[in-house]
Amino acid sequence: MITILNRQNADMKRTKICILPKLNDCGGDAKKQWFIYYSYRNPADNKMVRFRIIEG
């Protein structure tokens, strides 16, 4: 996990820059659609943005 210090808070709270990719395998069911999801922090508005990669 990559983190930076949030300088806006006086207590110097850590803020995540990204969430590493994770596999959603639907409990191992091969008939359902599997996907990978990850998130990163948008520097423009400082909010986390989630992405999904769906193949096949």
Image: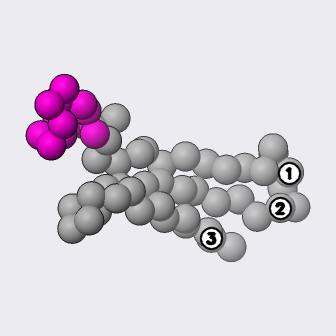
**Disc 2/disc 1 C-alpha distance (Å):** 6 Å
Residue 52 shown in magenta: no
Crowd rating for badge 1 (residues with CA inside 10 Å; few <14, some 14–19, many 20+): few
Instruction: Name which residue type carries label 3.
Output: Glu
Q: Are marks 2 and 1 in contact (CB under 8 Å)?
A: yes
Q: Residue placed at 18% from the left, 36% from the top?
A: 9
User: SS class of the residue under badge 2?
Assistant: loop
Residue 55, numbered circle: 3
Q: Earlier in the sequence, mark 2 or mark 3?
A: 2
Report the magenta residues as a range. 3-15
x, y percent for residue 54 = 61, 69
Location of residue 44 in the rendering, given as x and y in whole percent from the top left corner = 21, 68
Does residue 43 appear left or right of residue 50 in this picture? left
Q: Which residue is mark 2?
A: 32
Q: Crowdedness of circle 2 by 10 Å Cα count: few (<14), some, many (20+)?
A: few
* Quarter containing the C terminus: bottom right
Q: Quadrant of residue 3?
A: top left
Q: Which mark is residue 29?
A: 1
